[in-house]
Amino acid sequence: MEGRLPAHIEVAGIRRLAESLGGFATVLAKGERDAGTIAIVIIGRGEPAALYERMPQLDGNRRFVLSVEEISEKKQEFSDILARRTARDPDLWLIEADVPDKERFVAGLPA
């Protein structure tokens, strides 16, 4: 945990990143102020919504990776997954970002 930014500061940075890329981000669920987990739903450009969560990597970093993608015919299932995630983890920060370039946004996320 040492060296990690408090969650609320990281969330503010993620919101600013979305805005700097011509998009918008909002907090759907506010988690634990300092040590909460962060997950991001990325929407935009008519593409299916995608949930990115931070996962440990072999190099020791914790990068945001795609964990679930919305299926057009089953939008309710995606919403149910988000509801279950927030119900199971009261410390979770859930951010929704509407950005024009998903790959560029994800590449700019902190590890």
Image: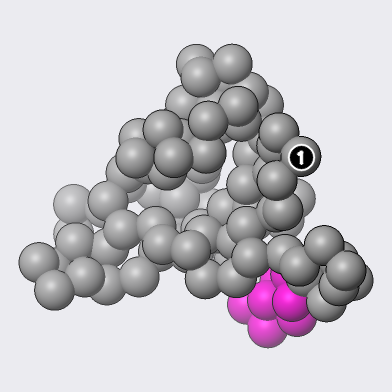
Nearest the camera: 64 or 32? 64
Q: Residues within 10 Å of mark 1 (few under 14, many from 20)?
A: few
Q: Is residue 83 left or right of residue 30?
A: right
Q: Is residue 14 visible?
A: no
Picture layout, residue 46 above or below residue 63 = above
Q: Which residue is mark 1?
A: 46
Magenta-colored segment: predominant secondary structure: helix
Query: Image check: 61 left or right of 48?
Result: left
Residue displayed at 13% across by 74% down: 58
Q: Is residue 103 visible?
A: yes
Q: Position of residue 63 (x, y in %)?
A: 31, 58
Q: Image quarter for residue 35?
A: bottom left
The residue type indicated by label 1 comes to: Gly
Query: In terms of secondary structure, where does tag 1 sit?
Result: loop
Image vertical order of residue 51 relative to residue 98, above or below: below
Q: Which stretch appears magenta?
A: 81-89
Q: Position of residue 21 (x, y in %)?
A: 51, 19
Q: Is residue 103 left or right of residue 93?
A: left
Q: Is residue 67 magenta?
A: no
